[in-house]
Amino acid sequence: MEQIDRFKSIWEIQCEQQKELRLDPDLFSDAERARVFGELIRQLYEECNDVSQLLPDYKRHVIRLKSGKASGLVAAFELADVLKVVLAIAQLLGVSDRELYHAFLEKSMLISEKFASERIELAEHTKLIAVDLDDVIADLSDWRSELGIVNEWQTSPALRLEASESMKNEFYANGRFRDLEPVPGATDTLNELSAAGFKIAIITARPQWQYKRLHSDTVYWLRKWNVPYDLLIFNRNKVEAVYGLAPAWPQFFIEDHPRNVVDLAEARINVLAFERPHNESQFVEGDCVKIVRSWQEIYRHCMEK
């Protein structure tokens, strides 16, 4: 009921304002109604254009709209302008608040049903596997060992954090990802899955947006070890990355980070949680989560799906 009350209050505010501005739709002649309708459509275009300026273009993707209160308030004001014009158009066309609200609910339901049916169809016809890269395909065991030694030298959490960040920077900026070994069984299994008709999307959180060489270093390494893939995606948000794969939908996401496993499972994405020494006993199996400890197990689950 709270959603209905909020929507109705917004609707009534817009009605009163239209009357104050002498734009009460009930008082328009047919000619006035047509004129105001055209003006509102043009205004809607202008307001939407203002919203489109809130984020920079792709070439400047590093400079994002910040999520702070000030920038959020700017976006809210711009979107409120769009909403006010849409409500004014609805009132001009004689649509009631109840009709618009229920049409919104029905439209949302239809879109959800369509998406769900498309996902089911794609799940039946598209064999796609999403795979994390580091600690799943590329073995970071040596790096973790080095980091452990460095951390033993430091006595305070601040110094340990500084040391770990320094080592990360060395890997990112100096090309040390090129020297990694693959996780045992990873390359052979991925080639077998590829030969069996699976499409492979590698999704990594490596900060390519911060260290530009990471893309080329990653591609170099994948080619060096003959790792098959159809898509290579850099994104820290694994759920967002999966939804960006549309119209494809992975049968499994192979992931080693506990937080990502939880997020993916909550989004109803089937996860093979890859247990290794650095994350041992940190996973909980559930409807969407199966724990695996080798690429042989991964192969078996994929082929049985």
Image: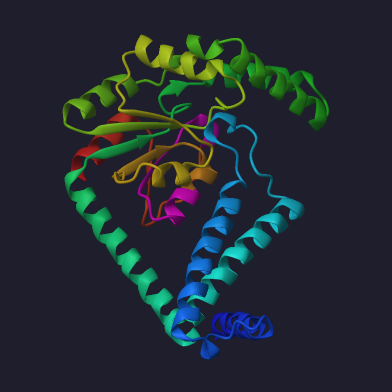
Side of 298 relative to 18 (left or right):
left
Tell me residue 52's x, y (percent).
Answer: 56, 48
Residue at the (65%, 44%) spot, across then down: 65
Residue at the (60%, 52%) spot, across then down: 50
Tell which residue pokes out farthest to the front in this image. 31
Does the magenta portion include 234? no
Question: Which is more toward the observer, 62 or 163?
Answer: 62
Q: Which residues are magenta?
A: 262-279
Side of 51 relative to 133 (left or right):
right
Mark yes or no: residue 79 visible.
yes
Question: Which is more toward the observer, 26 or 89?
Answer: 26
Residue at the (27%, 39%) spot, across then down: 128
Q: Is residue 208 above or below residue 82?
A: above
Tell me residue 302's x, y (percent).
Answer: 24, 39
Residue at the (48%, 86%) spot, across then down: 29
If the image is split into quadrants, where does the N terminus sit?
Answer: bottom right
**Quarter of the view holding residue 57:** top right
